Image (spheres, coloured by chain):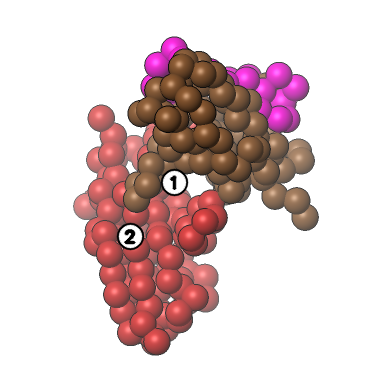
Amino acid sequence: GAGVSQSPRYKVTKRGQDVALRCDPISGHVSLYWYRQALGQGPEFLTYFNYEAQQDKSGLPNDRFSAERPEGSISTLTIQRTEQRDSAMYRCASSPYTDTQYFGPGTRLTVL
Amino acid sequence: GENVEQHPSTLSVQEGDSAVIKCTYSDSASNYFPWYKQELGKGPQLIIDIRSNVGEKKDQRIAVTLNKTAKHFSLHITETQPEDSAVYFCAQLSPGTYKYIFGTGTRLKVLA
């Protein structure tokens, strides 16, 4: 069956531009997570959705980062006014509840 | 703040030998500890997990042990095979939240 998909897989942008990263979770999964993963490191929690409700955004680094999941399915992570330090792999994961997360392939963001 | 320490960072074993990876956590109220395997170019994949009401769980060649007193949990892989080569991450579900804290990863190489 279809797993978690993310688009684009690679994104190169110039500093100061806004980017939107998309996550399409497994159908029917209630929970959706966003993570950032630096090279050689473990995933770093950014935010969590239960259906369309954003229940935890404590991991978002600053107010340039935002996320939404308006219909409880597809989610978008938006980074405004990108900076070089935002360059990383951004992964989303979905789960039937809050355990057994299924990770997507990630979006590699490079800010020049 | 909460963190999960993971050791070793790299581990090389001969095919057929056992591999052990250990993680230490700080919050004694933590009650769910998953392990993930990440292959090159892919997202992390859950391989085994354990809850705080049991001390050990096995699934074929993989086992996880939990020592709540010492606040550490370990992944054991027996009869290693070349396809076990990957980066392994431990994680902890932060109590009372939906937030997962990941370890820094262990790169396992199984030498044929």
Residue placed most toward the observer, A89 or A47: A89
Give the mark nearer the N terminus: 1 vs 2. Answer: 1
Q: Which chain carries label 2?
A: B
**Secondary element type, mark 1:** strand
Magenta span contains residue B67: no
> Looking at the image, which residue is at 36% across and 73% down?
B109
How far apart are the alpha carbons under marks 1 and 2? 20 Å
Q: What stretch is highlighted in magenta?
A: A53-75
Amino acid carrying label 1: it is Tyr
Toward which corner of the image does residue B79 lie, by quadrant?
bottom left
Same chain for labels 1 and 2? Say yes or no. yes
Which residue is disc 2 drawn over? B106
Chain appearing in red on the rendered image: B
> Looking at the image, which residue is at 40% across and 87% down?
B112
| Percent position of residue A67, x then y | 57, 21
| Percent position of residue B108, x then y | 35, 68
In the displayed structure image, the side of residue A54 where residue A24 appears, left or right:
right
Which color is chain A depicted in? brown
In the displayed structure image, the side of residue A93 where residue B28 appears, left or right:
left
